[in-house]
Structures are given as structure tokens and as C-alpha cells.
Image (cartoon, grey):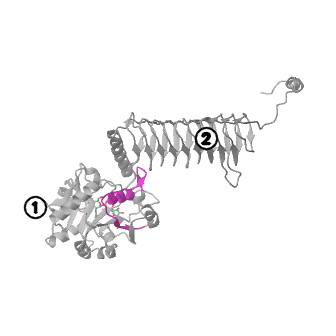
Amino acid sequence: MEKLCAVVLAAGDGKRMRSARPKVLCEVLFRPMIGWIADTLAQCGIEDVCAVLGAGADQVRAAVPDFSWVEQKERLGTGHAVMQAKDFLQSRRGGDCAVLYGDAPFVDAETLCGAYRLHKESGAAVTLLTASLPDPTGYGRIVRNERGDVARIVEQADADAGTQKIREINAGTYWFSVDFLLHALEELRPNNAQGEYYLTDVVGIAAAQGRRVCGYEAPNSRIAMGANDRKGLLHLNQLARQAELERQMAAGVEIVCDDGVIIQPGVQIGQDTVILPGTILKGKTVIGKNCVIGPHTVIEDSFVGDGCHVNACQIEQSRLEERIKIGPFTHVRPGSHLMAGVKIGNFVEVKNAVVGENTAVAHLTYVGDSDVGKNVNFGCGTVTVNFDGHDKYRTVIGDDCFIGCNSNLIAPVTIGSGSYIAAGSTITDPVPEDALAIARARQIVKPGWAKARRLRLGPRKK
Ligand code: UD1
Ligand code: CA
């Protein structure tokens, strides 16, 4: 494609969403709606994008940092919104510009490019995406002329009973010749039921000039779906979730029951991996082959190697190599790297730690800010004591160590390879290789003491 530009209308305030944030930041599968549009534009190779922003502009800019932007101070309609991008358009005369609405996230690259091809072949002044919906209520209706071109778009509020029966609707995505668009913006008037400047009125302006307006009917009407309120947003989430699950299954992922399974587009999952109910996979996550993930697991921005079992766990920004078994109820926090064959069990938290091959941390343990070697066995209830209330320190444990139950390793501390920490120890000093460290008070036994006390105090109170 030649160099193209786009204007994205995103000045809506989300009143019907009852949200404190701008509507276009409402999320579908954990991605703001405007982010979906940014992805589509990027896939089409369109990098020159101007967003029209209103309230909450700073938040929207943070979500789409590559877009340039203009402000629409008053919301006087979609036509008025595009007028705000006049300077942007002026400097792009001679080219073509896409206009998209920020609250319709499902426009895909294939459809946008298809519409562009029709736009160029037909030489139209405007080419717009349309879709046929079983229930077109609320959308602008497409009125075609005898040639099959678009003659008018009639908004719901302005449509008579006959027009309301038309099922072909305006999807809210357009290709314009920039020169024509600049001319048409000068001509727009707010002559309609809402008293707004409708972008859709450019169709009549083109006709008056004898220019063609083409309608590109999308093969999949889903691309027209927008969200104006929470119910609409849930519907978009449901559609997107189902589509993503189907895509994953087509690639060989097994989903036994999809209750509560949410997979963000872009997550990669290997063949024959089984995803169990209640599993949420987000962000830049990659999961290998032959894994079992879930039930009740959240994995975000993480890598999980082949053959791992992850049961009822939360994993964030971490890397798990192959054949790891973790859970149930394990939390792997950011910056962790678990090597092949590691086992992490019930109620264990790992944070910012490297855990070497085949090391086992089976129960009730905290491993934070640590470098742990291979084949280490952690007893139940071990704590790497990494924080003194002011600073954090690292614990370094060599290969083949045995850490007895209920030990505290007070960082910074180093445990040499092959060493043995006696249960109940609080280790404050370095332990050399192959040593035994016992750091606890010696036991005292006083024979008969308890019996004497019982006799002295009498029966135990209930
Ligand atoms: C619009 C179309 C309708 C189409 C539908 C598709 C018009 C007049 N109508 O209706 O034909 O079927 O979209 O979804 O264009 N916006 C601004 N500034 C404004 C007004 C709107 O930035 O002053 C933005 C909104 O943030 C939103 C988009 O433009 O992202 C569409 O506006 P909205 O009010 O939702 O239009 P619809 O009534 O849905
Ligand atoms: Ca809308």
C-alpha cells in the first residue's frame, strides 16, 4: 500500500458506560478498544494516525503513544470531530485517509484493506464499510442507488418506518480521498434530529458533486459491533473470547470446558496443551506443547515451557522452563526463572528468584530475591528473609543443598553447595560447601515439670 493515514474518533466520554475513563479505554479481552484499532492500523502498515480526543485525553494518549492527536473541546458530532483534524489532513492532500470510530474495535486488517482496494479501483470519493445485521437498531442505515452505490446514510433518529427496515448499516469505518474530505467538511451542516455535524452527511455532498460513494459490505458483520454501554461491552467480550478460543482450538489447543477461560489475543499456546476452566492467559504469554494449565490459573506476560503442569496458580512476568510442576496455590511473582524439572507446591511464593533444575519447593515457603542451585530440597515452611524493613537482599543457595523445615535464611547470606541446614534454623552467617548448619537453641527437658504444674493449678478451664 502507498503511504496512508488515518483519523480515529475517540472524544466520546463514556457517559452511557458510567465510567470515569473515556469510552475508548473500556477493555475487550484486557485491551482498550482503541488499542484494538491501533493493532489493526499497524497490521495494515498505517503508521500516520491522528486521534481526536476529548475528556481524559492524557489517559488515551498513554494507551496509544504512537498516535498524534488533536482535541475536540465540544462534542458536536462525528463530522465536527473530523474537522478538528483539518491541519493534519491539509498536510496530507493528494492521498487517502481512513476514518475509524474508537468504539468499534473489531474492524480487522483484512476488511480495512479490502475496502481500500475497492476505494482505489472504483475511484470513489468515499468508500465505507457496511454490514447487514439481523437487528440494525441504533445504527445508521445504508440507502443504495440503482447503481448499487451508497446514496445516503440515515441515522436511527432521522429514519422513517420504511428506512428503519433496512438491515444494511454503516459500520463507522471510511476511506476518503483527503482532498474530497477537506472540501466536504466545509459543507457539513447540523441539519438533523440531534443538531450535530454528522460525518455521514458527506455521502450527500459527494452525490451533489457527481462523485461515487462505494459501500464495502464486510463478509463478517462482527466488524460493525460497537459498545456504547456495559452490556454492549460484555457482548463484545463474549464475541472476542469465543473467537479467540476457536482460533486456539483450531491450532491444536484442547479446551475441555470453556467456563471462565479467557485468552487474550496474541497469547501463544503449543499443540496438545490442555486449558482447564477458570484459566486466564494475558499479555505477552507463551505456553509450550503438552502442558496442562488450570483449573483456576492466571498467567500474565510469562513463558511456560513444554510439558508443564500449572494448577491453580498465579504467574506474572516470569519464565518457566520445561517439565515444571507447580501448584496448587502457588504464586510466581515478577522476575522469577524456574529451570527444567522444578517442583513448586502448595502455598509457595517465589519472587525475583532463579530456581535451578529439579529443585523442589513443596510446601508453605517463600523464596524471594534468591539464586537457588540444582537439586535443592526445601523443607516445609522455609523463608528467605529478604527485607530488613528498608532494603532487600539476596539469598544464594548452591546445588544439592537440603534446607530443613521451618528455616529462616536471613539475607544477604550464602549457602554452599551440598550443605545441610537443620530444621528450625535461623541462618545469619555463610554456610560453607558440604557443611551442616544448626542455628537454634539446644533443647532442655525438665522431667515431671508439666505434671507438677497441673497439680498446682487444678483442672484446665474450658
Ligand atoms: C455512528 C454513525 C452511524 C453508525 C455508527 C456505527 C454518525 C452520525 N453516525 O453512530 O451511522 O452506524 O456510528 O457504530 O456518524 N465522537 C467524537 N466526537 C463527537 C461525536 C462522536 O469523537 O463529537 C466519536 C465517539 O467517541 C465514537 C465515535 O465518534 O468513538 C462514534 O460516535 P457515536 O456517538 O458512538 O456514534 P453512533 O451514534 O454510534
Ligand atoms: Ca457508537
Q: Nearer the viewer, residue 437 or 310?
A: 437
For label 2, being within 8 Å of ligand 1 is answered: no
Helix, strand or loop at label 2? It is loop
Magenta region, residue range: 26-54
Residue 49 located within the stretch drawn in magenta: yes
For the image, the number of numbered tags is: 2
Helix, strand or loop at label 1? It is: loop
Q: Can residue 43 be seen at all in this image of the molecule? A: yes
Q: Amino acid at mark 2?
A: Gly
In the image, taking residue 160 as reference, residue 292 lies left or right, namely right
Identified by mark 1, the residue type is Arg
- Of residues 328 and 380, which is closer to you in this image? 380
Indicate left or right for 454 with 213 as reference: right
Question: Pointer 1: what residue?
Answer: 147
- Number of the label disc, if any, that sits on residue 269: none
Q: Please identify the quadrant where the N terminus is shown.
A: bottom left
